[in-house]
Amino acid sequence: MIPPKSAKKLLLSTIRITEPELTFSHWTVWNHRNEVKNSNLPGVYILARFKSVPTGTANPKDIQIVYIGQTSRTLKRRWSEFNRSSLKGNTGHAGGRMYWKKYKGRVKNLYVAALPVKELPKGTRMPYIWYIESKLIWEYVQKNGKLPSCNRADKKEKKDFSS
């Protein structure tokens, strides 16, 4: 008889896991963020500043993106932490603190789009979320030559982007 932990590993290694479709929600103005469908789930999210109201599905490579993030908790909860940090400079969300430093809490032109993640077997959701966040940051850097303005880079990495 196979012990339960070994059975779980064997089961995950033999089942083909179908990767969810990578489609973000439409852009939603920041002050209406809690209306984003399935924001009670964990997932990946992008924040952008637009001068006029954006239309259509969000494009995570858009130059207006200021932050690409992820959460293992609900998107709503993480956005609440971002909001608190971005408006007052409080700790709790590094991207929110960077936003506060760069934009002084101005959220008038801030929009959010989400990729809530639900349809994966237990134990695979967070690795997928981490992978997607990293993939999107890498694709953004490939297209734009820099990190989104509120995603952190240490001093050494900042030098790498300027060379």
Image (spheres, rainbow, N blue to C red):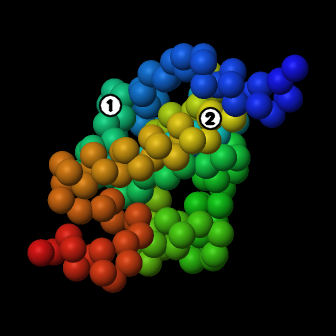
Pointer 1 residue: 55
What amino acid type is highlighted by mark number 1? Thr
Instruction: Tell me residue 64's x, y (percent).
Output: 28, 52
User: Which residue corresponds to the image point at 45% horizontal and 41% vertical from the top-left?
Assistant: 132
Residue 43, visible in the rendered structure: yes
Instruction: Name the quadrant containing residue 4.
Output: top right
Residue drawn at the location 62% of the way across and 33% of the way down: 124
Q: Position of residue 31 (x, y in %)?
A: 56, 48
Q: Residue type at mark 2?
A: Arg
**From the viewer's perspective, is residue 70 above or below residue 27?**
below
Q: Is residue 17 above or below residue 148?
A: above
CB-based contact (under 8 Å), mark 1 and mark 2 = no
Q: Given the current orientation, which residue lies at the most extreme left position?
A: 163
Furthest residue in direction front, as rendered = 1
In the image, residue 142 above or below residue 116: below
- Find residue 78 and report its horizontal and vertical position in percent: 64, 53
The earlier-in-sequence mark between 1 and 2 is: 1
In the rendered image, the quadrant that contains the C terminus is bottom left
User: Closest to the observer: 134 or 88?
Assistant: 134
Q: Tell me if 103 is positioned left or right of 121 in this view.
A: left
Q: Which residue is mark 2?
A: 125
Q: Tell me, yes or no, if residue 87 can be seen here.
A: no
Residue 87, percent across and down? 56, 69
Which residue is rendered at x = 69% and y = 35% of the image? 123
Q: Quadrant of the N terminus?
A: top right
Dot label at residue 137: none
Q: CA distance from mark 1 to mark 2?
A: 29 Å
The residue tagged with tag 2: helix, strand or loop?
helix
